[in-house]
Structures are given as structure tokens and as C-alpha cells.
Image (cartoon, coloured by chain):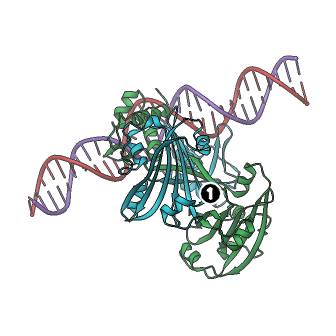
Chain colours: A cyan, B green, C purple, D red
Amino acid sequence: MAGWEEIRAEVLARIRSRAWPLGALIPGEAALAQEFGVARATVNRALSELARAGVLERKRKAGTRVAALPVRKATLDIPVIRAEVEARGEVYGLRLLRLEIGRPPVPVVARLGQDLGEMVHVQTLHLASGRGFVVEDRWLNRSVVPDPIPDFGAVSVNEWLVAHVSYASGDISFSADAADGWEAEALGVAAGAAVFVTERCTWAPEHPITWVRLVHAPGYRLSTLL
Amino acid sequence: MAGWEEIRAEVLARIRSRAWPLGALIPGEAALAQEFGVARATVNRALSELARAGVLERKRKAGTRVAALPVRKATLDIPVIRAEVEARGEVYGLRLLRLEIGRPPVPVVARLGQDLGEMVHVQTLHLASGRGFVVEDRWLNRSVVPDPIPDFGAVSVNEWLVAHVSYASGDISFSADAADGWEAEALGVAAGAAVFVTERCTWAPEHPITWVRLVHAPGYRLSTLL
DNA sequence: CAGGTCATTATGTATAGACATAATACGCAT
DNA sequence: ATGCGTATTATGTCTATACATAATGACCTG
């Protein structure tokens, strides 16, 4: 018994076998280190990983206990759309549907957290082998877009942002919605069809950068291993 | 400059400011350790975290480079439904709609990866303050269910499984779908309404345990910070 | 030139020891 | 008994050192 992965496996086995029941306090790092014949740092690494995965709960002084209600944590990969299309062996295409300057609707302002006045509004359609794959509806902070607006029909806004704008943080959410008129038309599906929607909001340290709503074609699945 | 979180912040700042451009090779751990005046292990910790987040790509001998196409990794919490309802300050309720033994339909067998013959089929409705919150459609391996079948109207199958069955792995996927007849009825929405669907499959080391489809009431959002 | 072998190198992991930090629990004083 | 300060304790992190491992590239051989 040596590596932290082996320690992790052993600890997990004890939890699964109920040797250490749900909610129970497990031995301290020092005790486990001695039992397994490794350094405390190795045990720490193993237990920390399990805590990150939601299997254990750790608190200083209080000790380590098996999570009572195991909130599983799953990590999702959020790829660039072009990479996603190409990974399916299809040809990526991009079409710019609309580019204008105007005031975003109230819900968008609310999500951004502040009213920036006029913003750049871009609607694009991402294609997989010619078929509609994702409809993108985006509002951009004017101050991050240079004056001759880049050709968003050639490079997607997202890829342009990744390459030219530094940013700090954001949030993302997934939901199901009925495709509204222009979205349905762009994707070539019936209006009202159930579509998978990704909404993302990103901020630079001080000001918002962009809000985007991605409407995926029916049949889209987001999946991962647990 | 001392802690690994400070190192991580500094590295991130250099990436965001393009001091280290996308795809570029960054200095080795030893060099950074010297520059920051910390031990190599501390730099390693910081860079490993960034690699886990998808910002860096690391390979032995090849060195560490800034991810060219930043595949963002988002971690989602998959809570137990009861905890989710209670976290909203609502009262959790559970209703058993159906419990029978039979053969699962072909798509379910396909997802499980093997035909187990007859399985236990359970359909339940999770309520938030009396209103339909999630409809659950589940197939269980008979060998994990004891002979007097537990009262799945009192404890949800998921919570029963967590407490009584050890398991090893699984996968999860999210999609949008139109609510079909009984699902819509149970949730009290129109048939065909767009609903958010979670599908989960779990295996013990050797045999499948369960497949479940959770249909969430309209308006459900899954969200996380990036 | 093709192919395989081996040295080099950057990251990955382990170790012992030390100190930091947070949270509990104990004990004292009111 | 109640409240507050403090000692204790388990986890969190850092250091310095060592060895493991994977991948590269150079070298050597047929």
C-alpha cells in the first residue's frame, strides 16, 4: 500500500462496504497514515480528493466524516462549439444572422447585474454539416469590442473573445425551453419544440463582458461520467 | 507571495493578460518556484489546480502550456432531490405511482449494457409544497432489492440505494424533451411541454444497479459557477 | 535511412518535519 | 448555570529532498 490512489480506493471500499457507515467519523489522518504505512501527506491527498468528489466531509478539528447525503459532484466539459462539431466528425459552419447595437431586454440586464446602456447584439447560427446545430443570441459590452467590429461571420464571438479578451469569472446554467419563432426557424424545427438551452454570463474583474443564450438542436445531450 | 492560491492567481493573471499567450509553453516548476520564492511542491499544487480547471495542459517532459482551446470544466452538484426541495424552503413530498416487475424496454436494456431479464420498475413523483417537482421513472436490478420490497412511498429509491447498496460508478446526462402523457399529467403541465430531463445509470463493479430518468417540472435550471 | 536504445528532462508523487488555522471543548469566573 | 477565554486537536499548507514515470530527442546500429 503506497500511492494516494490506492489509499483512496481503500477508503472508498470501506465506505461502500459500510465498514464506515454514512455520517460516521473516520479515523484521523495520523492514524490512517500509520495503519497504511505511509506519510500523513499521502493520506491527506487521498481524503482531500474524496472530499472534493463529495464522498467525505472534512472540517478542521472536527475530523473527517462520511457524507450523510452524498451530493455527487460531476464535472462537465464545456467545449467550444466548433470543437464539439468537429469531434462528431462533421463539418463546422457559421452564419451571422444579425449584428446591431441596442439596449438589451430587461432580463439580460438583470443577469449582467448592471445596466451598460447600449450593447452589441449578435445572433449567429452554428452549423454541423450544413444543418442547424446551435443558435446563439449574445449581448456584448461595447467596451470590449474594437471599433471596426470583427467579422463575426468568420470567427465565432466566443472564439474571438477567448483570443482577445481577458476575463475572470462567470456562471453557466442549463434548462429546457420551447423554441421560439426565429430560433425554431434557424434550427429548422417546429416552433415550440423542446430545446436544450445553455445560458452563460461572464465578467471581467470589474465589468460584465457578455451574456449569451445557446439554443441547441433537438436531440442534444450533455453527459459525463460520475 | 507564499500560498499556492496566490501562485495560482498570479499564473492566471499572466494568462489573462496574455503575458503567457494561448498555447504557449510556460516556465517549468523549478523556475517558477525560484521566481516566486516558494518550494516546487507549492508551484505544483497551483499548476495542477489550473490544469484540473482546464486552463493549463501539462505533460511530463513536454512541460506546461496554456490551453489553446480552453475547454472549460464546470463542476455540478447533483443533489438528492429531497435536499434540493428543502434547500428552496419548500416541503418535500413523495408519492409512489407504480411498482411492478417486468422487462424493461429496449433502450433501457441498451443503456444498462446487458439484459437482466425482469427488473423492478418504480415510478414516483417528488413534490415541492404539494406541487409536482420531479417525475422519476426507474428500473432496478432485482438482485439489489430485498424480498419484501422496501416502502418506496416512504423513502425515495435513491435515498434507499444510497443507504443500502454499495456502488462503483455511473454516468449522467441531461437533455430537453417533450413531456409525454403520464409525465405531463403527474407534473400538472400540458402534454408536450418542454421539460428538463436527467438520465442516470449506475453500476456496481460487476453488474448494473439501476437506470433512472428524472423529468423536472418546467422552469427547472441547473446552474453553476465557472 | 530506418529503427531501436538510452540519456535527459519536466512533471508526478512520496516523505518527514514544521507551522498555520479553525473549531471544539474544557475550565474558569461571574 | 451561563458566558468567555484558552488549550487542544485535526485538518490545511509549506518546505526540502528524493525517487518514479513518461515523453522527448539524440545517438547508435544495421
Tag count: 1
Q: In the picture, which quadrant includes the C terminus of chain A?
A: bottom right
Task: Classify residue B154 as left or right of residue D15.
Answer: right
Q: Which residue is mark 1?
A: A14
Which residue appears at 59% of the width and 71% of the height?
B208
Q: Is residue B174 visible?
A: no
Say which of A48 and B22 sits in front. B22
Task: Tell me where residue A46 appears, x and y as whole percent.
Answer: 54, 48
Task: Classify residue A137 as left or right of residue B199.
Answer: left
Q: Is residue A25 visible?
A: yes
Picture layout, residue A109 above or below residue B36: below
Picture layout, residue B16 above or below residue A17: above
Which residue appears at 61% of the width and 53% of the height?
B222
The image quadrant that residue C21 belongs to is top right
Task: Tell me where residue B141 appears, x and y as whole percent.
Answer: 64, 74
Q: Chain of mark 1?
A: A
The kind of secondary structure element at disc 1 is: helix
Which residue appears at 52% of the width and 59% of the height?
A183
Task: Classify residue A19 as left or right of residue D13.
Answer: right
Say which of B20 and A176 sits in front. A176
Which residue appears at 76% of the width and 72% of the height?
B97
Of the residues shown, which amino acid type is indicated by label 1?
Answer: Arg
Residues packed near mark 1 inside 10 Å, few (<14), some (14 to 19) or many (20 plus): few
Say which of B32 and C25 sits in front. B32
Task: Tell me where residue D14 appears, x and y as whole percent.
Answer: 48, 31
Picture layout, residue C27 above or below residue B131: above
Task: Tell me where residue A223 appears, x and y as whole percent.
Answer: 52, 61
